[in-house]
Amino acid sequence: MKRRVGIFSLILLLLIVATACAATGSSSSTTSSSSSTTSSTDTSTSTGVDNSALVTVSNVTMDPGVFFPYESGTITVTLSNAGTSAIGLSEPAILSNKIHVAQEEDWGTTTYIGAGSTVTYSFEVTADPPDGTDYALFTVGALGGNPIHYPIPVKVSSVPLKAVITDKPTSFSLSTPANVTLSLENCRGAEVKNIVVSAEGTGVDVSPQQVLLGSLDGSDTSGSTDSSDVDFVIIPHQESNVTFSITYQNGDNGHTVNVTLPIALSADKTAAVPILNNVVLTTSGPNYDITGDITNAGISNAEGVVVTVGSPAQGAGIYPEYAIGSIASDDSGTFEVTFTSNDLTAVPVIISWKDSEGDDLSLTKTLDLSPSGSGNATGSSSRPSPGSSANGGTGGTGRGGYGGGGRSSSTSMFGGLTSGRGGGISSFYPLIAGSIIIVIGIVLWTKRKWLMGKLKKQ
């Protein structure tokens, strides 16, 4: 009996232990299921975050920085992903009534931007007038999130590169070097590049003929503009125009602006002005002899002054050419030229000299030295070689002659003029005649009483 009770008690103990183990396993399973449910809920909450909010526009560039009306260019937009997962982007666009995008269908596919990465979109656009700033809207869709929008200010200006001649002489002289300055100023507010300045004209020498400047920046925040000066040397050989052509690029678009400089010739106000004075003609054997003065009425010195005669006269004898040398301003020098000629009605007297640059200049005065000549003279100036200035000079009245070329003559003590061949005894005829008249007058005066007595007796 006692043995049965022990066996029953052991079986009951085993049942109690089995029941306890089953309860413990069920509790563990329930806890695991609860944990799994919580994890699933957390994951769902995490995937509901809008990761597109972490994608931003980090940079926008435009080329050109400022558009001309109807001009094409490029707008480049860069986006950065500050999130931890890749985001899909699709259908980027620029929305504006003034800025038009070409080939929008190129962006029909989805682009993924990884965590910490960037993606760049470039748009070929054209800008419509009028001048001003248009705020175009960049937009791009994000997979699983809200689209991204960003305003882009686009400037349009029809103002060209400014080109002005800021320095030039008050007048240009024949074959005289003159300095001219062309100033360029960029008033567009953005860089222009590949600037080339060319100069050309008919009948003028320009140096340099072409200048490459590179680029000029746009105005800064203070409103100041970038500028550059280009210096040229112009030597005119005739009245003409010099055209300065300025080519430049705004982005990849070429533009040109022209500036015209009229070249009107006038006398050099600082040049030497030789004046011919005190001209006297005499004979010297078979030749004629001219003496006179050369006065410099100009501002500059006349260097290496030489006097001779031109055709039909020919230099001969002792002084076919006469070198005076340098004649300073307001100073003078004498000369003597011997020549032969069969025609004294037109004897060209040629005055040659050099300016301070060493350029050759000349002045011709044609004299009428015939006995019946009017005494008038004509003058002309010339420049044998380019690169200097000339002034024909003006005539002034001199003693015993005509400034700048007058009638060849010599003056007697009674104020009479002898023309033509002034040598020989004929040049003393007026003196002899005057002396005879004076003697007759003296005799008549001393014998006046005797003569009066004779007349009364008759």
Image (tube, rainbow, N blue to C red):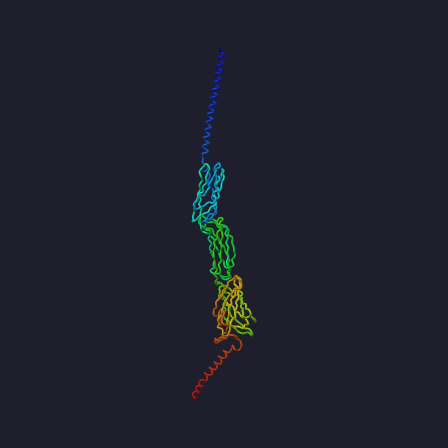
The image position of residue 427, as x and y in percent, is 51, 77
Q: Nearer the viewer, residue 368 or 399?
A: 368
The residue most toward the top is 1
Q: Nearer the viewer, residue 239 or 374?
A: 239
Residue 44: which quarter of the image? Answer: top left
Disc tally is 0
The image position of residue 27, as x and y in percent, is 46, 23
Q: Quadrant of the C terminus?
A: bottom left
The image position of residue 292, as x and y in percent, is 51, 70
Do we see residue 219 in this rendering? Answer: no
Do we see residue 105 in this rendering? Answer: yes
Q: Nearer the viewer, residue 126 or 257?
A: 126
Q: Is residue 446 above or below residue 328?
A: below
Residue drawn at point x = 49 percent, y = 79 percent: 433
The residue most toward the right is 317
Residue 452: which quarter of the image? Answer: bottom left
